[in-house]
Structure formats: structure tokens, C-alpha cells
Image (cartoon, helix red, strand yellow):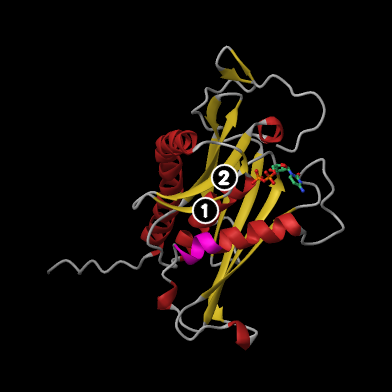
Amino acid sequence: MSGSGEKPVLIVDGKRLDGRLPGDIRPSRIEANVLKNAAGSAYIEWGNNKIMAAVYGPSEALPKHTSNPERAVIKCRYQMAPFSSLEEHGRSGPNRRSIEISKVIKEVFENAIITENFPGSEINIYVEVLQGDGGTRAAGVTAAAVAVAASGIPMTDLPYGVSIGKIGDQIVIDLNKIEDNYSDADVPIVISPRTGRILLLQMDGDMTKDEINRGIRMAADAGKMISKMQSDALKKQYMEISEKYKNEAPSYTPQAQK
Ligand code: CDP
């Protein structure tokens, strides 16, 4: 939606420029617990996006006035690395966009983490975009959810993000950067798959209610794959841990009877 100059043709014979159909998401992979010092972490590659998510806490909420005696407070920082895109990200520190994205990601996790379990504490979620190519808040939430789960902090669900949008009169999902720039609408959403609740919905451009509903149905279909990718990353991590401890565990095999 921010593109200037002549609008490129984004869909030819029903296919998008990278060969995808309207309901396809970009090839993606997630790896859980990649950082030694975080309570939980996850690295995601989603198309050309490369994003690291890290979770610290729960720990005492500081400064004190930020704490809530009834629940944990969630603090979130989304940031694009200076080298993450052709645009300038180096000098200015947090900007309007990164402050906004940090806020909406924080709200996602306030509605997913069981914060009542940790009164007076804070949970810090960091989303660092190493390479950005459209849809970084959705991919960032998807990775951050795996990082929170890997940290052992309980959630009611494992949310995932994906964007829906409109190119001409075609509804598409998971817009990459060029599609995002020249689309008629780009609507990042985050879904809680167990309940179907929508934890984030932002809108750039115009879509009718019917078009949004169609987009959400397409996103929920693709979401089955995203959810599986998230749980596979977590399962793989637990298999590795149990394998490690299986080999290290002391043997309690009783001595053979004489
Ligand atoms: O990444 P997302 O789609 O959630 O956010 P956006 O604000 O719609 O931006 C789309 C894409 O433009 C990002 O993924 C980045 O690749 C790029 N971008 C950037 O590099 N620097 C900015 N200040 C804003 C956007």
C-alpha cells in the first residue's frame, strides 16, 4: 500500500510473481530454543523474512511502578536490524512503526499467556527482524509464540500470524513486500487456533466485510500448516532434550539376583 510509481502486475494467469496461488503461504521453517541465555527462543524463516524471537522471565517487574500484583506484565520490543532491508533502520532507534508493532504484539501475548500465574512479575518478548520482506509482524508473532512455549510459560493456545489482502479483486494471503507495497489492502491478523479468536487485526487499504471473511477462511486453512510447523519445532526440541537426558541418566537397573 505504500508503493509509489507505476503499479507492477502482481498476478498473471492466477499465479503470483513468486509462483504462489492466492491461498499459498511462502515456504517457512521454525527452530525452537536457538539462544542459550533466553528462557525460550525461536528462529523463523518465512519466505525471505528471517526473524529471531527471545523470551526472558518471568522475573520481578522493574521499575516497580510497572508491576501488577494480580498478574504478570508483558513487555515487548519489535525491532528491525539496521541491515534488515534496503530502507534505513540504523540511526533512529524505536520509530512510530516499531512502537506500534511492539504494542500490538504485546497485546497478542496478554491474551494468550496465563498472566495470573505470575503476579508482580514481567515477561519480556523480543522480536528482532534480521531480514524483512513483508509480513514481519505476523511471522514475528508466530516465532514469539514458539519462544514463549519453549520457555515453559503457560499459554491458553499457540497463536500464529499471517496477513490477508487484496490484489485487484483477488483475495490473497501472506503478502510479500512487493505485494504489500502495491496491494489494494494488507491486513495482518493473528489467530488463536483452538478458539478461533482473532488476537490482532490491522488494516491498510479497503476490504469489504465479505472479503475479510473470505481472507480469514483462507488464512485459517493455511494456518493448519503454520500451527503444525510451530508444534513440530517444539516437539523436535523436546525429543532432543529427552534423547540427551536418556543418555545421561543414571541407571537404576536393580542388580541381578544372585
Ligand atoms: O512487516 P509487516 O508487513 O508486518 O509491516 P509493514 O509496515 O507493512 O512493512 C512491510 C515491509 O516493508 C516490512 O516487512 C519490511 O520488509 C519493509 N519495511 C522496512 O523495511 N522498513 C520500514 N520502516 C517499513 C517497512
What is the residue that sits farthest to the top in this orientation? Answer: 13
Residue with the most extreme front position: 208
Amino acid of disc 2:
Pro
For ligand 1, tell me if the residue under mark 2 lies within 8 Å. Answer: yes
108 inside magenta stretch: yes
Residue 39: image location, x then y, percent = 54, 67
Q: Secondary structure at mark 1?
A: strand
Q: If you read the primary sequence from the N terminus, does the residue marked by circle 1 or circle 2 appear first? A: 2
- For this rendering, which residue is in front, 52 or 79? 79
The reply to whether residue 35 is in sight is no
Q: From the viewer's perspective, is 178 left or right of 24?
A: right
Mark 2 neighbour class, 10 Å CA radius: few under 14, some 14 to 19, many 20 or more: many
| Contact flag, marks 1 and 2 (Cβ < 8 Å) | yes
- Which percent across, then down, holds residue 135? 62, 42
Circle 1: residue type: Leu
* Residue sitting at x 49%, y 77%: 72
Is residue 37 something that shows in the picture? yes
Residue identifier under label 1: 200
The x, y position of residue 131, in whole percent, is 71, 44
Taking the image as four quarters, which one is ligand 1 found in? Answer: top right
**Residue, x 55% and y 53% (percent of image)?**
141
**Residue 188 tag number:** 2
Q: Nearer the viewer, residue 134 or 2?
A: 2
Magenta region? 107-111
Q: Is residue 237 rendered to the left or right of residue 165?
A: left
Q: Is mark 1 within 8 Å of ligand 1?
A: no
Comparing 116 with 100, the one in front is 100
